[in-house]
Amino acid sequence: MAHPPRYPLFTLLGHVATWLPSGSPALRVNLLSAASDAIAVALVFVIVHRLTSRREVDLRHGWPPLVPAATVALLLASSMPFWPYAVVERRRRHEAA
């Protein structure tokens, strides 16, 4: 049974991903999972970068806002709550085999 917050959308997108012409359906859904998690990390990077950058500082030194943005994005990508959900489909496939 699909439940909120993103599982119904992921189920629909997973069904669309199975229409891709190459690889097994499990591989296609795994690629969808990896792509959606990469997009989430990229969005966090962009949001933190915009929140920490100021126009007058960016004109002289463009890299200081990149440090907190990259740090937060990497912490999210490797965090214990986020990482297992990024690879959950892959683990289920191996457990079933």
Image (tube, rainbow, N blue to C red):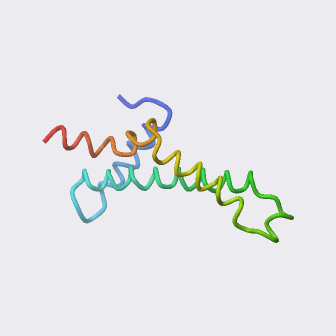
User: What residue lies at 43% left-to-right and 29% top-to-bottom?
Assistant: 3
Query: 34 and 13: which one is in front?
Result: 34
Query: 7 and 44: which one is in front?
Result: 44
- Report the side of 57 relative to 73 (left or right): right
Horizontal and vertical percent position of residue 63: 69, 66
Q: Quadrant of residue 61?
A: bottom right
- Report the side of 11 relative to 65 (left or right): left
Horizontal and vertical percent position of residue 35: 43, 56
User: What residue lies at 21% left-to-right and 43% top-to-bottom?
Assistant: 93
Q: Quadrant of residue 81?
A: top left
Query: 69 and 39: which one is in front?
Result: 69
Q: Residue furthest bottom?
A: 60
Horizontal and vertical percent position of residue 65: 71, 59
The C terminus appears in which quarter of the rendering? Answer: top left
Vertically, is 83 above or below 32?
Answer: above
Q: Residue furthest left?
A: 97
The N terminus appears in which quarter of the rendering? Answer: top left
User: What residue lies at 82% left-to-right and 64% top-to-bottom?
Assistant: 57
Horizontal and vertical percent position of residue 16: 36, 53
Counting labels gives 0
